[in-house]
Image (cartoon, helix red, strand yellow):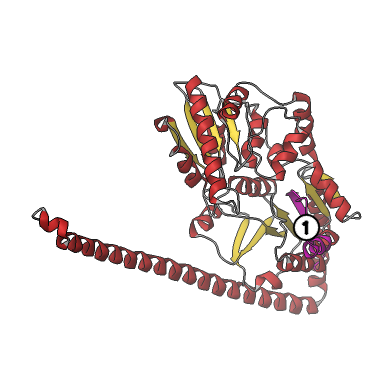
Amino acid sequence: MRILLDAYFDNNFGDDLFADTLLTRYPQEQFYVFWDKVHPDVLARTMRYRNMVVLPGSCTMRSGLPFDGYIMIGGDVLPDGVDYSRRIGGMKWVKESGGFVAMLGFSLYEHYGEKTRGDLRTMASLADSIVTRDKASAERFKMLVPEASVTESTDMAFTLPHMAAEEKRAPILGIAPRRKLYSTDQEHEDFCSAMAAVADGWLKGHPDGIVRFLALSTGEYDDRVTSRDIIGRMTKKTQTEIVSHTDQVEEFLAQVRQCTALVPTRFHALVFALIYGIPFVPVPYEVKLTQLLDEVGYAGMRIPYGRPVSEEMAAQAVRDLEQKQTDPEKVAGYCAKADVFFTDTDRLIAAIQPCRAENLHSFGCSMHSENEALKTENAQLTRDREYLQNQVKALTEWVQSLQKERQAFEDQNRELEAIRVQQAEQIEKLSRRSPLAKLLGK
């Protein structure tokens, strides 16, 4: 089965985990992803999936190959003001080919402009299954599109086997930072100062402890940069470390399970604090965290993003990190909702399989009985060959463009280095000619 996959790939742990879960759940299906531009490192990481083909967005197969399904995955995939025409076009193509459309695991924002509301209605009318990851998003979608098939579930990560937290050998405070999109420099400064104050306060009570910064995103939005900004404001910089998301999902999750407490700004850091039963104090920078906290009955303090934090607030956060602040029954009930996350998708894929088998059987019988069917097959093989040739051509052009881009970047670096050396020489000459230098006999 050929499935058109609409996903986000930029070295982000949550999105990579979602793709990994989907591709692992359906190993017999062939997934196709079309990208206009992608970093070579991200492209290399996707090569480990044998059932996923990555093609350039301009590839002719996008409109020439009939797909059996369209699956959109992700959390923040439906923001306001985005051009959804290409996504809607893909959905329509799949539906016209007799395939299904599934939208899995997203959150809806509180407010949308009229154009985006219209696009959401169009996508909902094309979708055979819509799965939200929180109750509030499901209710908003039903209000926006009452006739849509909406299933209220949880985040995809709750479908994973719930492993126990690692044995605690030493106190480790995990901080999962992020710089909020479109935040001001002052908001970023206040956020970093707040995190530094909490980290230093926690270390006073755990002199042998470590503050582990969990960089869940290392792509365009690089959490390692924000981690270093926080460490720079701490007084105990030597008791810190930065752990980055890598190809190995389980390896990174092991680093999370070792933490004795967490301060999650990233959504999936909060998710795994709940899964592993780790005490936490959140920084709900966006409504998706607030909705999750409300659903699981979180009763502790919430550190406001981008606002100054007093010494009293920092001290309260440190105290709250010593014990769980959630309702166990509500957490268990929330996790149980994940059981229906893939139910509709399983059904849609299973429904396609018998039809395909029946069609193949009929086609095979007709080949034996009618010579005309052979001509049809030959014509199809010719078209397939043309598609593959176009694919090879498009991929070759794509690789060449990436190589040119890399060469241009290296040339720019060399030019900048030459300018730096030239300026250093000029500064040296000016220093020798200055009156002060002459006075000192230099």
Residue 192 x/y as whole percent: 52, 40
Q: Is residue 169 left or right of residue 368?
A: left
What span is colored magenta in the figure?
Answer: 97-122
Residue 310 x/y as whole percent: 57, 32
Q: In which quadrant will I find the C terminus?
A: bottom left
Report which quarter residue 407 is drawn in. Answer: bottom left
Residue under label 1, please give it: 112
How many numbered circles are shown?
1
Q: In which quadrant will I find the N terminus?
A: bottom right
- Whether 10 is drawn above or below 334: the answer is below
Q: Residue at x 62, y 29 (%)?
A: 280
**Which of 186/44 is in front?**
186
- Is 110 magenta? The answer is yes
Please rate how many residues cluster around mark 1, counting C-alpha atoms within 10 Å: few if below 14, some from 14 to 19, many from 20: some
- Whether 22 is drawn above or below 211: the answer is below
Residue 269 x/y as whole percent: 61, 37
- Is 382 magenta? The answer is no
What amino acid is labelled 1 in the image? Tyr
